[in-house]
Image (cartoon, rainbow, N blue to C red):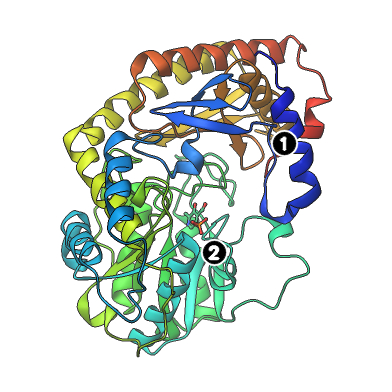
Amino acid sequence: MGKTDKCTQIVKEDERVISPFTRVPYYPLVIKRGYGAMVEDTDGNQYIDLLSSASALNTGHSHEKVVEAIIEQVREFIHYTPAYMYHEPLVKLAKEIIKITPGDCAQKVAFGLSGSDANDGMIKLARAYTGRSKIISFIGAYHGSTYGALSLSAISLNMRKKIGPFVPEIYHIPYPDCYRCTFGKEEKSCNMECLKHLELAFNHYIPAEEVAAVIIEPIAGDIGLVVPPKKYVEKLYDLCKKNGILFVTDEVQQGFGRTGKWFGIENFEVVPDIVVMGKSIASGMPLSAIVARKEIMDSCDAPAHLFTMGGNPVSCKAALATIEIIKDQKLLEHTRQLGEYVKQRFNEMKTKYEIIGDVRGLGLSIGVDLIKDTQTKERAREAAAKICYRCWEKGVIITFFGNSVLRIQPPLVIKKEQMDKALNIIEESIQEYIKGNIPDEVLEVAKGW
Ligand SMILES: Cc1ncc(COP(=O)(O)O)c(C=O)c1O
């Protein structure tokens, strides 16, 4: 890494004027520009991006087609709220989203600005459509930071302390985590205790007939990219159907090609009732969407869910370009193939370094879980922080979450050679950590979730 004087100066100024409650700090990287899977900082250092702005840039940085679409729309008009008037990009985009959303669930769309507001809208629709108030979510879930979305979330005490009360009637159950089973089971001894937990709840304190929806991330993202077993998702789905409960998939992080399918839930044999999307939908422009059958989308009275800036035409044009790019550049196939290769490389590392406890994921949504001990699987938080920091120093943007899990979510346009270079840097950094060559001081900076 070269000089970082300008970055350091800007970060100092940032700390003076920006509230810390909007950030999870990793290292002082100040972005100047981005192209494809590469990022440059204000001092001219270059990095391979394995984070994609938290999985919000699946088509890469400033894709030419996205930039052109944005400029074209900005020249026409920047915004006129769809809350009062109409515009064509909104309608065109809704039609395209309906085409790519799985099953017959996609008939109408409601646009917003962020994954969080879309999850709030989902709560409103689920309650209005079913006439029921209760929602089931998961421990470890992150659905956003507005009050509704945060009430669905259960990932961090710091996100909940001091700010309650939350939206009532939301219940959290254990996520099916086969590597660190809440019920202490192994694959052989597993009897779907996590699902039984929900059945138990239905029998004792949550009347199933009062539950409007179950919301699940098809891969639990921010808790450490935990992939649920297929049969769990299918049984959960059956349980919902049996009890008239809506099955909702939060695709904000896993959607738009991240897992090698348009939506993460397509990796499972179920057809959701409501799909919530955001992040990569518009390649970095603010946009979110809720998609469902007509009768669900028409169940709330107007204007229960409108945002002056929602469904912005510039964002809609960027989203139309995003869909075209994913199709034209065959990014779904590329993601599946490269994802398998990346997992194989990490699995090879796993045989060499005991610190790697688990490698998991679908497509280019891969988690590498670092542990202190192969028996106890105790999370190696310090190792994760130090390795991420050293990777940054060597030119790779990578973060960790879930206390110990390296987050591998590069832009889907990343080339194999770039990925190889990044993987080599990660391996070198792991070796340096094992040798004790990464100082403790970095922990002051790389705090993480
Ligand atoms: C699964 C999931 N849902 C919702 C959100 C919230 O999205 P946003 O930050 O755009 O409001 C996130 C953000 O990380 C997410 O990962």
> What kind of element bears circle 1?
helix
Q: Residue 196, how many percent across, how many down?
A: 47, 63
Q: In the rendered image, which quarter is residue 232 located in?
A: bottom left
Up-down: is 406 above or below 170? above
Quadrant in which the C terminus appears: top right
Residue ID for mark 1: 10
Q: Is residue 434 left or right of residue 322?
A: right
Q: Nearer the viewer, residue 309 or 112?
A: 309
Are the residues at dot 2 and dot 1 in contact (C-beta closer than 8 Å)? Answer: no
Numbered marks: total: 2
Quadrant in which the N terminus appears: top right
Q: Residue furthest front?
A: 75
Q: In the rendered image, which quarter is residue 59 located in?
A: top left
The kind of residue on which mark 1 rests is Ile
Q: Residue 158, how many percent across, how many down?
A: 74, 57
Q: Callout 1: few (<14), some (14-19), or many (20+) C-alpha neighbours within 10 Å? A: some
- At 56% from the left and 29% from the top, the residue drawn is 398
Residue ID for mark 2: 173
Q: Nearer the viewer, residue 153 or 369?
A: 153
Can you see residue 406? no
The kind of residue on which mark 2 rests is Ile
Up-down: is 252 above or below 345? below
Q: Residue 101, how many percent across, how many down?
A: 22, 57
Up-down: is 256 above or below 394? below
Q: In the rendered image, which quarter is residue 289 located in?
A: bottom left
Q: Nearer the viewer, residue 288 or 196?
A: 288
Can you see residue 378? yes
Q: Residue 399, how many percent across, how many down?
A: 59, 33
